[in-house]
């Protein structure tokens, strides 16, 4: 079974918080759950940005290595 990424974990927690907010009858608990959902969603967005930046960095390094290899061949 593949492990969940950070982003997937955060989104799952956000969904749990939303479900708890929908189930409760207490306003203060609902508010707390909705704040929790917002925080988990923000963490998921940050994790997605981090992953995109990581992939860009890897691609840049691969291009630089390929350019260096081409320069050495010439």
Image (tube, rainbow, N blue to C red):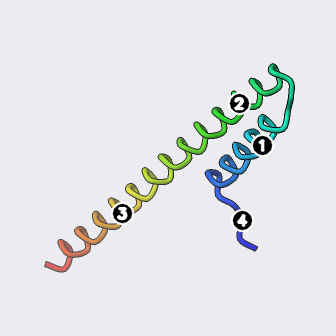
Indicate the secondary structure of the residue bearing disc 4: loop
* Residues at circles 2 and 1 in contact by the CB criterion of under 8 Å: no
Residue matched to label 2: 34
Q: Which mark is residue 59?
A: 3
Q: Secondary structure at mark 3?
A: helix
State the mark number for residue 3.
4
Q: Position of residue 27 (x, y in %)?
A: 80, 21
At horizontal 76% and vertical 74% (from top left) the residue drawn is: 1
Between discs 4 and 2, the one toward the N terminus: 4
Dot 1: element: helix
Rendered location of residue 32, percent (x, y): 77, 25
Which of 59/51 is in front? Answer: 51
The quadrant holding residue 43 is top right
Report the quarter where the C terminus lies.
bottom left
The image shows residue 33 at horizontal and vertical percentages of 76, 31
Label 3 crowd (10 A; few <14 / some 14-19 / many >=20): few
Q: CA distance from mark 1 to mark 3?
A: 39 Å
Could you tell me which residue is drawn at 53 percent across and 41 percent down?
46
* Disc marking residue 19: 1
| C-alpha span from label 1 to label 4 | 23 Å
Residue farthest to the right, as pictured: 25
Residue ID at (59%, 45%): 44
Spot the residue most to the left.
Answer: 74
């Amino acid at each position: 079974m593949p492990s969940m990424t950070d982003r997937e974990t955060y989104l799952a927690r956000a969904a749990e918080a939303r479900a708890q907010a929908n189930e409760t009858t207490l306003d203060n608990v609902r508010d707390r759950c909705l704040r929790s959902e917002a925080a988990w969603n923000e963490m998921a967005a940050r994790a997605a940005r981090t992953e995109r930046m990581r992939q860009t960095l890897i691609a840049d390094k691969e291009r630089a290595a390929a350019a260096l290899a081409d320069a050495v061949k010439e």
